[in-house]
């Protein structure tokens, strides 16, 4: 009995799409400005940007031709330290001190509370309202006035080493001290603050176990301060700057 004949399906031939690879234009032919003859490479002096025509023997400059095929690298401008920010390097630590600014909430308090305090005093004398209202609003007004007048003493301290980035407000003014794992900081980016004062907020992208999260670092008065702080922190932590979809500054 003859063994069964094995049958195989014909292999289908797939037509592959033609792959077009785009290459940047990094070449240029040089022609003599006198006779329009093409100049061979041996007659080009790239170091001095000169060429000699082999046909009419004129010598001419090819400086513009050489510059046109050079690959221009983007040079990142180093930002200088603006007023109100101090840096101090000690061993492996980077200490940054930032002068606090008057926030939109403080301006609202110093404008709104005195008006409310005046009306509460009038209601106390004219309508017999509780004495507690004028006392509370007067104390609140005094607090905001004192806070605004002493802003020159208010500082934000950022301490960075190879393990932690910590930020402290002094005086606290209801701000908690916070610490972040420096090795988990993936990127910093800037956004205009939401208080309508034209300030700028620095955010950090933190790599966590459950994924990336966005943490507010601090808010500063000008864009130059925000960009400078972003620059110095990223340089210290060896973070390469890249575009972030949430960034708008």
Image (cartoon, grey):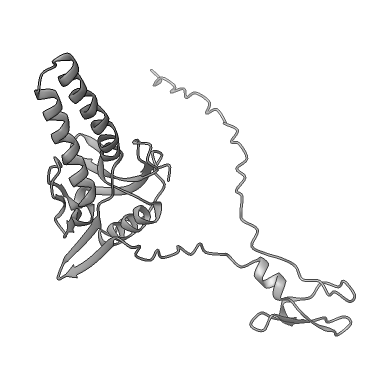
Residue at the top extreme?
Answer: 127
Q: Quadrant of the N terminus?
A: top left
Could you tell me which residue is drawn at 65 percent across and 58 percent down?
25
What percent of the width, then of the height, locates residue 94? Answer: 20, 63
What percent of the width, then of the height, locates residue 189? Answer: 35, 47
246 vs 51, left or right, is: left
The image quarter containing residue 215 is top left
The image quarter containing residue 92 is bottom left
Could you tell me which residue is drawn at 14 percent across and 71 percent down?
91
Q: Nearer the viewer, residue 205 or 143?
A: 143
Could you tell me which residue is drawn at 13 percent across and 49 percent down?
171
Against 124, residue 242 (above or below) is: below
Against 213, residue 88 (above or below) is: below
The image quarter containing residue 61 is bottom right
What percent of the width, then of the height, locates residue 47? Answer: 63, 82
Q: Nearer the viewer, residue 244 or 22?
A: 244
Against 155, residue 75 (above or below) is: below
Circle count: 0
What percent of the width, then of the height, locates residue 84? Answer: 29, 60
């Amino acid at each position: 009995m003859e063994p069964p004949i094995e049958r195989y399906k014909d292999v289908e031939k797939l037509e592959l799409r033609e792959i077009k690879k785009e290459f940047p234009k990094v070449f240029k032919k040089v022609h003599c400005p006198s006779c329009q003859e093409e100049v061979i490479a041996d007659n080009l002096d790239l170091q001095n940007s000169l060429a000699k025509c082999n046909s009419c023997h004129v010598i001419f400059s090819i400086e513009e031709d050489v510059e046109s095929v050079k690959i221009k690298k983007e040079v990142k401008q180093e930002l200088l330290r603006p007023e109100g920010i101090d840096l101090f390097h000690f061993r492996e630590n980077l200490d940054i001190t930032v002068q606090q600014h008057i926030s939109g909430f403080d301006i609202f308090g110093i404008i709104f509370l005195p008006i409310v305090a005046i009306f509460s005093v009038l209601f106390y004398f004219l309508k017999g309202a509780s004495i507690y209202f004028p006392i509370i609003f007067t104390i609140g007004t005094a607090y905001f006035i004192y806070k605004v007048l002493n802003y020159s003493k208010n500082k934000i301290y950022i301490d960075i080493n190879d393990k932690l980035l910590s930020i402290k407000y002094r005086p606290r003014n209801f701000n908690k001290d916070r610490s972040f794992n420096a090795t988990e900081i993936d990127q910093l980016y800037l956004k205009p603050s939401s208080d309508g004062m034209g300030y700028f907020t620095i955010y950090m992208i933190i790599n966590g176990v459950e994924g990336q999260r966005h943490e507010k670092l601090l808010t500063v008065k000008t864009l130059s301060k925000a960009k400078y702080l972003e620059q110095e922190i990223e340089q210290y932590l060896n973070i390469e700057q890249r575009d972030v979809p949430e960034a708008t500054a």
